[in-house]
Structures are given as structure tokens and as C-alpha cells.
Image (cartoon, rainbow, N blue to C red):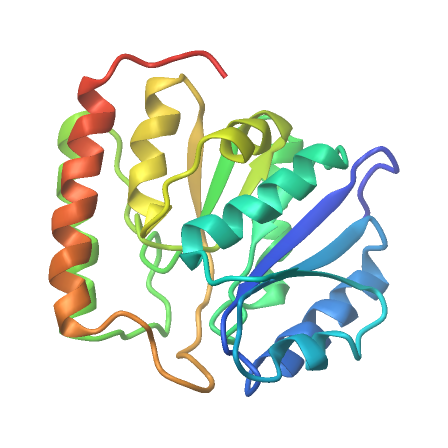
Amino acid sequence: MKFPADQNILIIVPAYNEEKSISSTLSQLSEIKEELPVIDVCVINDGSKDNTSKIVKQYPDVILIDLPLNLGIGGAVQTGYKYAHRHGYSIAIQFDADGQHSAEDLTKLIQPIMDGEADMVIGSRFVQKTSYKGSLARRIGIYYFYLILKALTKQSFTDPTSGYRAKNANVIKLFANHYPKDYPEPEVLIQLYKKGFKSKEVTVNMNDRQEGESSITPLKTIYYMGKVTLAIFMQKIVRSKTI
């Protein structure tokens, strides 16, 4: 697939202690970059205490931003959006460092933005049946946020917790200035809805985490659902401001 020369695309890879999986992820993205030279890859090393940064430096074509402290997923991803906005990228894509996302699906996320069909495109595991299984608790959480967002926006987001997303320049600008700190994926859907942005889902395949352990423990899951529920309702109540 070829993209117009005036399109420049940034893949944002937030990483925290991902030394066991980051090499495989970057090798996968490097292959895509050879096919699509308009793509740049930027790793946000979120204060990792392992060899994540050292491994990334072995990939000379990869942009590395080393954060001195751990900001969490929201702060790390927003750093990527700030970089994308400052350097004039037309599309930014969030891509997990742990091997769950497939680079083969990148064009599925990019094309609706280039066609003007959406401002943000979400890679969903549930629009159509895929090989993804997931734990019962995770599936319950996904369906819980699906119901809340359906009630508030009258739109169906089958995979509201998916972090595999592409955004156009207008959303990049918004997120560079305003992005939730904790577990941002469901919250930004109501944020974009209130500002009149169009979001769309496309089917993607996702793998299980390749190495390491998820940071979301059962206790954090309870906090996550409560915090994000409150944030979503606050987003609905508070009057929207211009970008």
C-alpha cells in the first residue's frame, strides 16, 4: 500500500520495563517502515528500570524519548502526541510494546483517516470474531464500558479499552494538550464525542502479551473501573472547551 508523499505518520510506542518484548516489536515495525517510508517509530521509554532504553538504541531509525520518571500510560502516550504535534505529523498511531498489536493491521487503521471517514480509528477485537480470548474479568470490563458509552453517546464501541488507535492531526493537537493520566482509552471516547470528532472501529487481530506481566492487577481493575466511570461522567457533565 502506498500513501501520498505529504502524509507523515508517527507510531507511538509507550514502553515501561519491556526489555523482553521491545526488540520483537521494533523488528516488526522496522519491516513495515521499509515498505512504508512515510512512517516513523517513536518509543517513549517511561522511566524503565531495565534495559528497554539500551535495546531501543540498537535501532538507529527509531526515535527514542527517555522520560526521567515513570509518568504512567497517559503521560507516556501524551508525550508521544506532543512530539507528533510539534513535528507536524498528519497521523499518529498508538502501538503497544508488549507484542499484543500486529503491524500487519496498521493500514486498516490508517485508511479511514486518509479517506476522511474518521478522526480516530480504533482497532477492535470484537467488530468481527477474531482469535482473541481474554480473561472473563477483562471481557466483563470491556462490556461494562461498552454499555456506559452506548448510553451516553448513542454509539457502539465494541472495544472501548483497545489501545491500538490511529488519530488525525486535529486529534493529535487535542491530545497533545489534554489527555487523561490513568487508563485513558474509554475516557477519550466521550471527550472526542463531545467535541464532534468522528470515531470508527475496524477489526484487528491481537495477541496475548508476549513477555512480562500486565500492570493491571485485580485490585487495580476495581480502581480502574471506578475511576474511569467517574471520569466519563465528568466528561459528559463538564462543558466542552475549544481545542
Tell whether 12 sits left or right of 165.
Answer: right
Residue 26 visible to an observer of this rendering: yes
Quarter where residue 209 is shown: bottom left
Tell whether 26 sits left or right of 223.
Answer: right
Quick one: 232 or 99, which is closer to the camera?
Answer: 232
Tell whether 74 sits left or right of 148.
Answer: right
Percent x, y of residue 142: 21, 55
Quick one: 206 or 40, which is closer to the camera?
Answer: 40
Quarter where residue 53 is shown: bottom right
In the depicted structure, whether residue 11 falls above or below residue 151 = below
Residue 123 visible to an observer of this rendering: no
Percent x, y of residue 236: 21, 23
Residue at figure coordinates x 57%, y 47% from the top left: 79
Percent x, y of residue 161: 31, 53
Residue at figure coordinates x 50%, y 78% from the top left: 17
Quarter where residue 137 is shown: bottom left
